Image (spheres, rainbow, N blue to C red):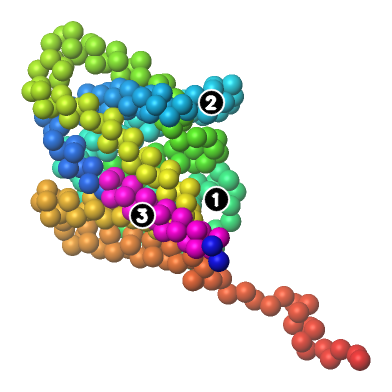
Amino acid sequence: MRVIAKSMDQNREGIWFGIAAYTAWGVLPLYWKLLQTIPALEILAHRILWSFVFITLIVVITGGWKALATVLTNKKKLFLIFCCGFIISVNWFVYIFAVNTNHVIEASMGYFINPLVVVLLGVMVLKEKLSRWQLAALILAASGVLVIAVQYGRIPWIALFLAGTFALYGLIKKMIKIDPIAGLVLETFIVLPIALVFIINLEAGGAGALNLAPILTKIILAGTGIITAIPLFLYAKGIENTTFSMMGFLQYIAPSINLFLGVVIFKEYFSFYHFLSFCLIWAALAIFTLANLGVLKESIMPQADEINKIKTPQRI
C-alpha cells in the first residue's frame, strides 16, 4: 500500500511540474514583449549567451560534470547535439520574431500542430504504424492549416516552421537520450561562438543593446537565460515522475495560453477563418489524444480461421 501511495504521490507531483513548465512556456510572450524594441536576432544571441551562463552555473553548483563528460566521449551524440543546438536556435528566433511582430496567434497554432507533426515524423523516420484515428487527426489538422492558408492567401509558415523544428528537435532528443542539463549546456555552447561574435560586433559598432538600452532592459536580456532554463528543468522533473501520455496532454496548456494572450491581451486579428481553422486543429488534437489514451480503438475484424472455427462444429 505504501508503494502504491508513493507512486500516486510521484505521479501527482509530476503532473504539477508539467503544468508549471507548460504554463511558463505559455506566458513567455509577455516576457518577449518587454524586449520589443530590440531586434529578434539580437534577443536570440543574448538568449543563447545567458542560457549558457545560467545552465553552466547549475552544473557547477550541482556537480553535473559526470553526465557532461559521458556525452563528450560519444562522437555520434555530439554531432546530434550539434544539430539540436542549431535547430532549437532557429526555433527560438522564429518564435521571438513571431511574438514581436504580432503573430502570437499563428505561433500558438504551430505548437497545437506540433504533436501531430511528431506523429508524422514517427511514421516517416521511426517507421511507426499509424492507426485510422491518428490518420483522421492528421487529415483534420492539415485541413485546418489549409483553411488559414486560403484565408491568408499564403502558407502560415511561422506555424508550420515552429511545429516542424520543435518536432525535429524532440525526435533527435528522443534518439540520443541524454541528461537534459548536459544536453542544454552543449546545445548552447555549440552556437555560443556565433552569438558572441554577433553581440561583440554590435557593441563595437555602438548599436548593441548593452551599449544603448536602459539598465532595466539589460537586466531583462540577462534574464532570458533563466526564463529559458527553468521551464526545461520543470519539464524534465515532470516527465521523470508522470507518464509520457500525460505530459503530451498537458502540452496543450502552452499554446492555449498563447492564443488567449494573442486575442485578449495583444488584440491581434482573429477572424471566423481563424476560428474554423483552430476548431479543425482542436478536433484533430481531441481525436489524437483519445486514440493515444486508448479511448478510441481500432475495430478488429475476426480472422478467417477464427470465423471457420465458429462456423464448423468441433468434434468431441
Q: Position of residue 82 (x, y in %)?
A: 47, 25
* Disc 1: which residue: 123
Q: Is residue 8 highlighted in magenta?
A: yes
Q: Is residue 65 highlighted in magenta?
A: no
Tell me the distance, in whole angstroms, between the alpha carbons under discs 3 and 2: 29 Å
Outermost residue to the top = 204
Q: Amino acid at mark 3?
A: Trp
Tell me where residue 12 sits by quadrant. bottom left
Q: Residues within 10 Å of mark 3 (few under 14, many from 20)?
A: some
Q: Is residue 197 above or below residue 152?
A: above
Disc ID at residue 66: 2
Residue nearest the viewer, comparing 174 with 94: 174
Instruction: Please tell me which residue is depicted at 54% across the width and 71% down the height of the picture.
Output: 297
Tell me the distance, in whole angstroms, between the alpha carbons under discs 1 and 3: 31 Å
* Disc 3: which residue: 16
User: Which quadrant holds the C terminus?
Assistant: bottom right
Answer yes or no: do the residues labelled 1 and 2 have beta carbons within 8 Å? no
Which residues fall within the magenta stretch? Answer: 3-25
User: Which quadrant holds the N terminus?
Assistant: bottom right
